[in-house]
Amino acid sequence: MKARITIPEIAQRLSIGRMAVYSMLEQGIIPGIRLGKRWIVTRHAYEQWERTAGMRSGAGFNAESEVRVN
């Protein structure tokens, strides 16, 4: 398995277009590093992001939070 994941691969896994992936990278939603015109996304970082539904640790979010309405 390759250490990097491609933009088309991410788009396919998320069922979105490539341009949406680029937008998410630009906004810092998906973890990646920009080198010139290219984006580098490591498979490990992406899969960690995918497992946590994109929640960043320490960002003030609790991935296990629930909202209950009585």
Image (cartoon, rainbow, N blue to C red):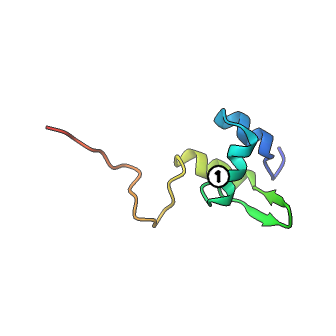
- Residue 36 placed where, x, y %? 86, 67
- Residue 14 placed where, x, y %? 65, 37
Q: Tag 1: residue type?
A: Met
* Residue at the spot 78% in from the left edge and 46% down from the top edge: 7
* Residue at the spot 81% in from the left edge and 52% down from the top edge: 3
Structural crowding at the residue carrying mark 1, measured as other residues with C-alpha within 10 Å and reported as few (<14), some (14–19) or many (≥20)? some
Q: In this view, does 67 lie to the left or right of 50?
A: left
Q: Residue furthest left?
A: 70
Query: Against 30, is 13 above or below?
Result: above
Q: In this view, does 39 lie to the left or right of 58?
A: right
Where is mark 1, residue-wise? Answer: 24
Task: Say which quadrant the N terminus sits in.
Answer: top right
Q: Is residue 67 left or right of residue 22?
A: left
- Residue 51 placed where, x, y %? 56, 45
How many marks the image carries: the answer is: 1
* Residue at the spot 59% in from the left edge and 55% down from the top edge: 29
Which of the pair 52/34 is nearer the observer? 34
Q: What element carries label 1?
A: helix
